[in-house]
Image (tube, helix red, strand yellow):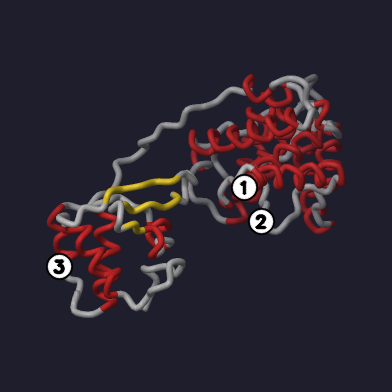
Amino acid sequence: MQKKPLEELLQDLEQELLRLGYTEGSMKFYRNRWKKIIQFAEGRDEIFYSEQLGIDYVEHHYQILEKDFDKTLSQKDTQELRIIRMIGDFQLHHTVLRRYYKHRKLLTDSYYIGVIKDFKRYCEHKDYSKVTVNHYVKQSERFMDYLVSQGIRDCHDVELPVINGYIRTLAGYTYKTVEQNICSIRSFLRYLQEQNILQTDLASKTPMIQARKQTRIPSVWTKEELDALIGAIDRGNPKGKRDYAIILLACVLGLRVTDIKNLTFGCFDWGTKKLTFIQSKTRETYSVRIQLDSLTHRNVFKYITTSIHNCITVRLLWRH
C-alpha cells in the first residue's frame, strides 16, 4: 500500500471513524489532536506520519517518554498515546484497532448482519457449546468489520491476502488469543465454502498458530490438603454427604464441575455398574465403571440411595 501524506491519511481515518459511529464529541477531540500533530509535523518539515513522529509529538506536548509507554499511565496520558497508535495502526492496516466493543454494535452493513446471523445458526446446528458459538460469532464479526474497512462488501470477494492482512492486525496479542481468533476465522471460512459463497478452501490455507499449552505452572493441591478438605465435611447429614460425593467425583474421577452439576439418577446404571453422561466440553458420551469396593463409588452410591431425589431426571447434586 502506497504511503499517504499525513493530512490525507487523517482525512481517511476521519471517514473510517464516522463510519464506525464515533460521536461528534469524540470526533471533535480527535480533530483537535490531529490538528496539533499536523502542526508539529509541519514544524519539522515532515509530510508523512511515522512512529518516531508520534513518539516525539507526545513527548513534546505531554511529556510522555517512550520508556514509559508500557507503564501504568493516567487515563489522560493513555488517551494521548491512543491517538498516535490509532494513526499508526490505520496507516499500516487501514483499519481502526484497539477498539472498545462492549456496548457498540460492530456490524452496521445489512449484508454482513445477515451473514453473521446465518453463521450463528450454522454453529448452533453443529451443536457447538454456547460459549464456542458466541466466541466464533464475535470474532467473525470483527473479521467482517475488517472486510468493510478494506472496501470488501461481499464475502464472495474474500481472498487469502485479505485474511493474512487481518491476521497481521493481531500482532501483539498473546499466542492463545491469536490462536482462538484464527480458529474462529477458519470456522467462518469453512462455513462460507459449505454455503458455496467461497469456491476455494481458504480455511486450510489460513495459517494456524499453535499456542503453548503450559504458559505457567498449574496450581495443584497436595494429598494432605485434599485429606484435610475431605475430613472437614460433616457426613452426618444429607448436605454433607452430597458435598462429600461432589469432592470425591472431582478429585478421584476428575469430573468437571459442570458435569458433576448435571448428573442425574438416570446417569447411574447399577445393573451394568456404569456411570454414563455427556461431557459438557466435548459433547461426547463418557462412561466410567462403578466399583462398589472403591471408597469414592461407595460414598457416591450411599448419597444417591439415601437422597430425597427419586426422579430419574432430577439433578442429584444441587443444593438441598
Q: Marks 1/3: CA distance?
A: 41 Å
Residue 36 coordinates in the image, percent (x, y): 77, 43
Q: Name the residue located 34 percent from the left edge and 78 percent from the top edge.
A: 308
Q: Where residue 133 is drawn, which disc sits there?
A: 1
Q: Name the residue located 41 percent from the left edge and 64 percent from the top edge.
A: 264
Q: Where residue 231 is drawn, which disc sits there?
A: 3
The earlier-in-sequence mark between 1 and 2 is: 2
The kind of secondary structure element at disc 1 is helix
Location of residue 64 with respect to 262 vertically, above or below:
above
Q: Which amino acid type corresponds to the residue marked 1 in the rendered image?
A: Val
Task: Name the residue that disc number 2 marks.
Answer: 102
Q: Which amino acid type corresponds to the residue marked 2 in the rendered image?
A: Lys
Please state which of residues 199 and 170 is positioned toward the viewer in this rendering.
199
Location of residue 162 with respect to 219 vertically, above or below:
above
Q: Are marks 1 and 2 in contact (CB under 8 Å)?
A: no
Please state which of residues 263 and 312 is positioned toward the viewer in this rendering.
312
Q: Which amino acid type corresponds to the residue marked 3 in the rendered image?
A: Gly
Q: Are marks 1 and 3 in contact (CB under 8 Å)?
A: no
Residue 284 coordinates in the image, percent (x, y): 46, 44
